[in-house]
Image (cartoon, rainbow, N blue to C red):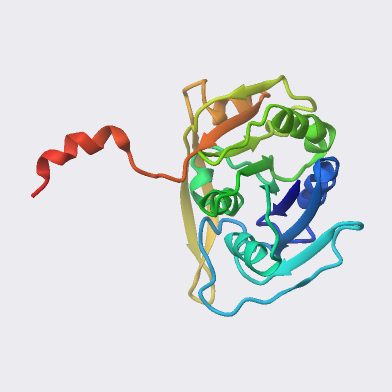
């Protein structure tokens, strides 16, 4: 199996090393990642020239650094490397990508690009600041995904470890995307531009979501679609056709 590993934290980030090494038993692993952090890049792409070069990032694994966005890493890997990748894993992100985070996430964006290019995509994230739980349980999570063939061309499998207050997960839960809304306050600095002062976060009250279950100690799995149509409104709005 040809396996492509990407991320949005950069080719030298800790999370991508953990993920790449966990995938070695499953096939030939290639890493293509940004040359520096590109967090919150969503599904953006570079419209100009992109640098692409080998990187000595992970011993024993073929690694490449890309000056573009996380999505560009998938685009260049499939075009330049001339490999027929069977699956794309994105992560492990330094920070959860649950609820509304999914909208902003370069980690999820790269996995969605895989789906667009006809390759199953899986995104994996851990709570910000610590990979301790991910290190302990990533092998079991990958085995669970691969043994059960939970990857698909119909969705990105978005996986999140629990919040950092848990040193062991309580189990696995398939669920839906929840709500994790941000209200950002900015402060004008002494040169006339604006810095982020603080983020106020509103969390989900529905217990059966990735946001709530992650806060309760579960590893969550959400099938995320590339199709962003709100299908329940299509027929309702068709009455306005001209």
Q: Is residue 142 above or below residue 62?
A: above
Q: Single out the residue that lies furthest toward the left.
A: 242
Q: 239 left or right of 49?
A: left
Q: Nearer the viewer, residue 139 or 214?
A: 139
Q: Is residue 30 above or below residue 19?
A: below
**x and y, in percent, of residue 58 in the image:** 87, 58
Q: 122 left or right of 25?
A: left
Visible residue check, residue 78 = yes
Q: Single out the residue that lies furthest toward the bottom.
A: 49
Picture residue at 59% right of the left edge, 42% below the top: 97
Picture residue at 80% right of the left edge, 62% below the top: 63
**x and y, in percent, of residue 86 in the image:** 68, 47
**x and y, in percent, of residue 165 in the image:** 73, 30
Q: Nearer the viewer, residue 165 or 189?
A: 165
Visible residue check, residue 35 = no
**x and y, in percent, of residue 112 in the image:** 54, 49
């Amino acid at each position: 199996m040809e396996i492509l590993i990407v991320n949005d934290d950069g080719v030298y980030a800790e999370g991508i090393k953990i993920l790449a090494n966990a995938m070695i038993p499953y096939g030939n692993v290639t890493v293509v990642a940004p040359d520096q952090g590109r967090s919150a890049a969503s599904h953006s792409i570079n419209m100009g020239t992109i640098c692409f070069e080998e990187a000595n990032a992970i011993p024993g694994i073929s690694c490449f650094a890309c000056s573009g966005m996380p999505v560009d890493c998938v685009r260049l890997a499939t075009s330049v490397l001339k490999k027929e990748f069977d699956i794309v894993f994105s992560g492990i992100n330094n920070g959860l990508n649950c609820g509304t985070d999914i909208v902003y996430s370069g980690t999820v964006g790269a996995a969605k690009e895989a789906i667009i290019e006809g390759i199953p995509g899986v995104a994996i994230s851990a709570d910000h600041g610590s990979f301790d739980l991910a290190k302990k349980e990533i092998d079991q999570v990958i085995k669970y995904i691969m043994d059960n063939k939970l990857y698909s061309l119909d969705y990105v499998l978005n996986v999140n470890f629990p919040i950092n207050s848990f040193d062991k997960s309580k189990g696995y839960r398939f669920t839906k995307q929840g709500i994790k809304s941000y209200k950002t306050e900015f402060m004008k600095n002494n040169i006339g531009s604006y810095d982020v002062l603080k983020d106020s976060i509103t969390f989900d009250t529905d217990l059966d979501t990735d946001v709530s279950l992650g806060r309760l100690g579960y590893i969550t799995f959400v099938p995320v679609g590339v199709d962003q149509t709100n299908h329940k409104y299509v027929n309702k709005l068709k009455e306005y056709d001209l």
